[in-house]
Image: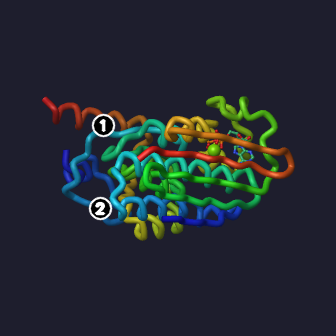
Amino acid sequence: MRLDFTIISDDFFAAGAASARIKKSLQQVGIPTSLVRRISVAVYEAEMNIVIHAYSGKISLELAREKVRIVVEDEGPGIEDIQLAMQEGYSTASEEARRQGFGAGMGLPNINRAADKFEIESTVDVGTKLVMEFNL
Amino acid sequence: MKLEKIVDLLNLKPLSDYNKDLNVLGAYTSDLLSDVIANAKEDRLWITLHGHQNVVAVALLKDLAGVIITGEHYATNDMLKKAKEMEVAVFKTELDSFDISGKLYQLLNNDEE
Ligand SMILES: Nc1ncnc2c1ncn2[C@@H]1O[C@H](COP(=O)(O)OP(=O)(O)OP(=O)(O)O)[C@@H](O)[C@H]1O
Ligand SMILES: [Mg+2]
């Protein structure tokens, strides 16, 4: 199974749609609830990071026999210091995003906790790519 | 405790449909979405001042029992539309987050005894 989504920056209404759809699809194919929750949480955090910090992006999910692999790629400002960005509490979220409850600086740490494998690559002024894997 | 009983005893105003028979296991009070994602657990109520659609998305992801919007904060139409679509329970209380958390804590803890 393969699912693809396009995410647009600052589209707060559609925000969360990809993770909600992924959640439903994984439930339908019988993935255990706790794993579905971990995957959808990680996708949500990645999705919202595109909405808040980048310009646009793509999410693709591949369900293989022994794992779920998700690649999230955006066009955006990129992350200068990935180690710093991974620290809980570090956030450059805008005032508008903070008013909506974002900006705890916990999104990337949440993805890291949820996924069995998590990698970030980023180029300043170009964009960011996340690869996460979940063992079935 | 059944959600219906909590709604009744705490005088919560339902802003969307909810499952009256759902067994509520607890609650979490926070206004930071990623904190709720990290720490709230399924079948718990979420107490917050946020009344916008991102709250619905998070409640859905985490299989929360519902959202209680507190104090002088109100749900936007977009939130209610999304709550209906996603079947997420949303309630309103005029109490602030501290007071409603305290009351709910008491209710759930006395219920255990
Ligand atoms: N896709 C991205 N493009 C550019 N910068 C990013 C991206 N994702 C994360 N960042 C940077 O890393 C920081 C930390 O991200 P993280 O998701 O942990 O927290 P946050 O988004 O600021 O707040 P929260 O996720 O708790 O609402 C961000 O504030 C931002 O500076
Ligand atoms: Mg984030």
Image quarter where the C terminus of chain B lies is top left
| Same chain? Circles 2 and 1 | yes
Residue drawn at the location 61% of the way across and 55% of the way down: A47
Q: Is residue B16 left or right of residue A68?
A: left
Q: How many marks?
A: 2
Q: Is the residue B44 above or below the residue A12 in the image? A: above
User: Which residue is situated farthest in the left direction here?
Assistant: B113
Q: Is residue B18 left or right of residue B56?
A: left
Which element carries disc 1, helix, strand or loop?
A: helix
Q: Chain of mark 1?
A: B
Residue A19 locus on image (x, y percent): 51, 58
What colouring style does the render use? rainbow
Residue A68 or residue B111, whichever sits in front? A68
Q: Ligand 1 within 8 A of label 2's CB? A: no
Residue A84 locus on image (x, y percent): 73, 30
Does residue B94 appear in the picture of this structure? no
Give the residue type that dot 1 points to. Lys
Please give the residue where the numbered disc 1 appears in the rendered image: B103
